[in-house]
Amino acid sequence: MKLAFNPLNNLGIVSTFQAKQSQQSFTVEMDEADSKQTEIDVSRKKYVEFVQSCNAIYQNATPTQLVDQHANAIHIANGVYYHLGLVNGKPLNGTALTGGGFNSNFSPMFKDSGTGTRLTPEQEEALRRHRSYSQAERQGANEWVAVFMNLSRLAEGRQSIANVNNDAMFKQHFPKFAQGIGLDIRQPFTINGKSFIYSQGALQAVNAED
C-alpha cells in the first residue's frame, strides 16, 4: 500500500523580489512587489508554525482546548496546537497553518527533502506515527479535521455559512465533533466572537441586535 503524506516543501533560500522594468506605472510595480513580499511573509510564517507544531507533536505537548466551556465559545487561530477531541479514544491534536493545511499528530507533515527514496529521520518518525493508527482511525481524524477547517475558514471570513452548511463532511460530523470538544450546540455559541445557533441541522448566524 502506498502512503501519501501532506508535503511541506523546504523553503530554502528566499530571494528578494525585484520587479521587472516595464512600461507600467511605478504604483503597479510597487503593488506587485508588495504582493510578492506578502507571499514570502506567509510562507515564512507557515514554516515557523509547521516547525512549532511538529515540536509539539513529537514532545507530546499539552494542546490548547478549542472551546471555553464556561462561555460556550470557540476561538480559532492559525499556529495554535489544539485538541480536537478523541478518535477511538485517542486524542486528536493539531495545528491549522497560515495559508492552508493542517498538521496533526495522526499523520504529521514533513519537509520534502528532495533526496530521492531514502527517508530522513524526520520522515521516518512521521511514518511511524502515521502507521501507529489504523486506517479507520485516520479516516475518523480526517472527518474531525474537515469540520475544524470549515469552522476555521468561517472564522477567517474565507467561507460563507451557506458553503459550510453545504459541506458533506460538516453536515454529517459537526454534532459529534461539537460534543467531542465540549461545545453545547443546544445553546447559542460563538466562533471568534461571532454568535451562532445550530438548528435543524444547520449553522445560523445571530445578529448582535437580536
Image (cartoon, helix red, strand yellow):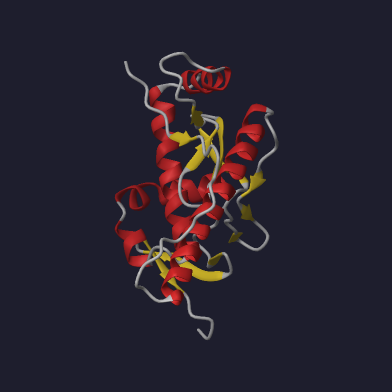
| Point 54% across, 57% down: residue | 184
Q: Is residue 106 above or below residue 194?
A: above
Q: Nearer the viewer, residue 178 or 46?
A: 46
Residue 147 as seen in the image, left or right of residue 52: left
Residue at x 61%, y 54% (from the top left corner) = 67
Residue 132 versus residue 49 in the image, above or below = above
**Above or below for 23 versus 76:** below
Q: Is residue 75 left or right of residue 23?
A: right
The correct choice, above or below, for 121 with respect to 32 in the image is: above
Quarter of the figure that contains the N terminus: top left
**Can you give x and y, in whole percent of width and height, for residue 107 in the image?**
48, 29
| Residue 203 figure quarter | bottom left
Q: Residue furthest top?
A: 118
Q: Looking at the image, which residue is at 47% across and 36% down?
A: 8
Taking depth in this image into account, of 193 and 206 the one nearest to the observer is 193
Find the residue positioned furthest to the bottom.
Answer: 209
The image position of residue 104, as x and y in percent, is 52, 36
The spot of residue 95 in percent (x, y) is 56, 43
Question: Is residue 16 in view from this perspective?
Answer: yes
Position in image of residue 195 (x %, y %): 52, 71
* Residue 82 shows in the view: no
Looking at the image, which is closer to me, 103 or 137? 103
